[in-house]
Image (cartoon, rainbow, N blue to C red):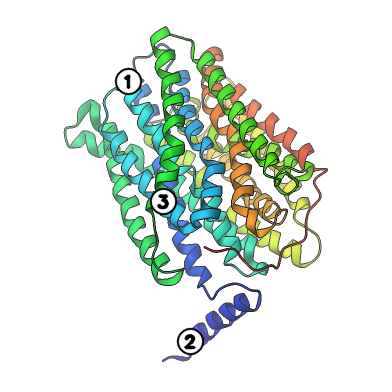
């Protein structure tokens, strides 16, 4: 054994002993981070590819979007239907994780993403495609709350926010992979003679990648985090909840298609469904006696402020390729490579935000000042981006890429900072539920952002109004974070995996 390998093994043992002293099981938490990061990569690649696929359909007047009268609005509505499904399993996913095991829910989520991504590439017609994407969203919706809880429960307190940031960097990798590879895979499908069906190729490729990650995650959880898993009970409970939700969402879309409602009306009804669902969940939490932990004024401010993060995340993730393509008058591949600077910024921003937040906690400064700084700087940069695409001329790809990257660093750094604040606001036994509530409420932004932005684009002929709306919502969140009172980091025993 070399000296370097011995020192590395000793350092790892010391980290495990540190975790044990703080009440955590002896879990190789850095390996856990790696596995969960891979889960984020494939989960976000599977959902991100829809935006570039729709951009290709619009550009080539192909598929079930290309010949629509308002293609941007209809494409945004497809994205909003996905996020409505994704939103409605956020809280149940956290509760099921608290009950049946968080690692079990991670595997169930990845399996659902894999199967439904394949189905999305096989279906024919708009309604069938929407149904497949809704089911994808319902399955993927349980990943977030269980991933966040596993990290906090099995990472030493001093490194928790860093862990949250490192793992969620997989989101940026997945976004980048989805944005860049989707046009390339479509071109590959075209070269293979798929013609107008070339858009299906990315779904098959990403589903295969997801399956590989499922095998890795399943093997790791069994060997290092609790042994055998029972996937049947949590899957059946998730299915029991998702079935009526699926019927409602797809039924809404079918009704809209049959009656030829305007897309804005469909989006409004979808938002109403989401709000009613939130009210039902909130009432149930209050009746259960868990309201003081999950629904106090302090944490409500964070829940609502986080809407801005999801709005901006999925405005740029869904539409950035099309925005750059139209503004710079570039090819789809060039636009994807430029838009990827925004997604790729998270590879730096997420871990940097986590590291800075942990440093701030150790030095007694707290995370909130960092959250305010990131929110303010990001808002200014987005306003500049909106101004750059609002003129008559075509901005350079270099300028757009620079603005997307710098704003993305601050935006992505903000997320683990706020997530760390959230995790410390509740008891360990309620963390899955708290993260589920956070994403449940904030996903309103993801539900509305694609379709509202598409409506603004079709109405004005420019993407600048959508950019300004995104910046304005983020500015509002700055003032919501201001009165938030941080809680000290918890050092209690973890709950089961």
- 245 sits to left or right of 421: left
Residue 163 higher or lower than 312, as above or below: below
Rounded to the nearest angstrom, the CA distance separating label 2 from label 3 is: 45 Å
Q: Nearer the viewer, residue 232 or 146?
A: 232
Q: Residues within 10 Å of mark 3 (few under 14, many from 20)?
A: few
Q: Residue furthest left?
A: 193
Viewer can see residue 483: yes
Label whose residue precedes the other's in the sequence (2 or 3)? 2
- 156 sits to left or right of 296: left
Rounded to the nearest angstrom, the CA distance separating label 1 from label 3 is: 37 Å
The residue shown at (59%, 38%) is: 440
- 11 sits to left or right of 187: right
Q: In this figure, which residue is indicated by the disc labeled 1?
A: 64
Residue 488 higher or lower than 156, as above or below: above
Q: Residue furthest top?
A: 259
Q: In this figure, which residue is indicated by the disc labeled 3?
A: 233
Viewer can see residue 328: no
Viewer-side label of 1, 3: 3
**Which type of secondary structure does the marked residue at label 3 adopt?**
helix
**Which type of secondary structure does the marked residue at label 2 adopt?**
helix
Label whose residue precedes the other's in the sequence (1 or 2)? 2
The residue shown at (58%, 36%) is: 443
**Which type of secondary structure does the marked residue at label 1 adopt?**
loop
**Quarter occupied by the N terminus:** bottom left
Q: Residues within 10 Å of mark 2 (few under 14, many from 20)?
A: few
List x then y, in percent, for residue 156.
63, 70
Viewer-side label of 1, 2: 1
- 209 sits to left or right of 276: left
**Which mark identifies residue 4?**
2
Label whose residue precedes the other's in the sequence (1 or 3)? 1
Viewer-side label of 2, 3: 3
């Amino acid at each position: 054994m070399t000296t370097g390998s011995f020192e590395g093994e000793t350092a790892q043992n010391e980290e495990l002993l540190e975790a044990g002293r703080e009440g955590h099981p002896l879990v190789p938490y850095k390996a856990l981070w790696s596995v969960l990061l891979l889960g984020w990569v494939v989960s976000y690649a599977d959902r991100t590819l829809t935006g570039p696929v729709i951009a290709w359909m619009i550009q080539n007047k192909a598929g079930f979007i290309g010949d629509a009268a308002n293609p941007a609005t209809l494409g945004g509505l497809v994205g909003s239907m996905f996020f409505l499904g994704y939103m409605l399993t956020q809280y149940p996913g956290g509760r099921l994780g608290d009950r049946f095991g968080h690692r079990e829910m991670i595997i169930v989520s990845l399996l659902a993403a894999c199967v439904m991504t394949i189905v999305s590439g096989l279906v024919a017609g708009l309604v069938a495609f929407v149904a497949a994407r809704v089911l994808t969203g319902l399955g993927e919706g349980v990943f977030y709350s269980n991933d966040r809880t596993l990290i906090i429960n099995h990472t030493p307190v001093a490194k928790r926010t860093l862990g949250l940031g490192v793992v969620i960097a997989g989101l940026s990798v997945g976004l980048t992979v989805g944005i860049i590879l989707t046009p390339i895979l479509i071109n590959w499908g075209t070269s293979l003679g798929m013609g107008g069906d070339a858009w299906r190729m990315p779904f098959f490729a990403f589903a295969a990648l997801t399956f590989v990650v499922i095998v890795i995650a399943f093997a790791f959880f069994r060997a290092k985090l609790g042994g055998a898993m029972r996937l049947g009970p949590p899957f059946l409970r998730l299915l029991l909840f998702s079935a009526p939700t699926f019927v409602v969402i797809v039924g809404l879309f079918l009704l809209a298609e049959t009656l030829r409602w305007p897309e804005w009306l469909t989006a409004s009804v979808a938002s109403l469904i989401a709000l009613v669902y939130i009210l039902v969940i909130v009432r149930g939490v209050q009746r259960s006696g868990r309201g003081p932990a999950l629904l106090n004024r302090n944490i409500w401010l964070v829940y609502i402020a986080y809407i801005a993060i999801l709005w901006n995340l999925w405005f740029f993730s869904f539409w950035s390729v099309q925005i750059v393509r139209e503004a710079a008058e570039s090819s789809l591949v060039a636009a994807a490579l430029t838009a990827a600077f925004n997604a790729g910024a998270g590879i730096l921003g997420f871990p940097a935000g986590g590291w800075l937040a942990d440093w701030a906690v150790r030095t007694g400064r707290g995370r909130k000042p960092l959250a305010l700084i990131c929110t303010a700087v990001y808002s200014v940069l987005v306003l500049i981006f909106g101004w750059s695409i609002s003129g008559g001329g075509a901005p350079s790809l270099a300028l757009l890429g620079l603005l997307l990257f710098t704003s993305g660093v601050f935006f992505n750094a903000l997320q683990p900072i706020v997530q760390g604040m959230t995790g410390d606001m509740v008891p360990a036994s309620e963390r899955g539920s708290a993260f589920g509530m956070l994403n449940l409420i904030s996903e309103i932004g993801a539900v509305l952002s694609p379709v509202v932005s598409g409506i603004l684009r079709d109405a004005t002929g420019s993407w600048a109004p959508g950019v300004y709306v995104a910046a304005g919502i983020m500015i509002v969140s700055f003032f919501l974070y201001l009165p938030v009172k941080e809680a000290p980091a918890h050092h209690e025993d973890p709950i089961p995996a």
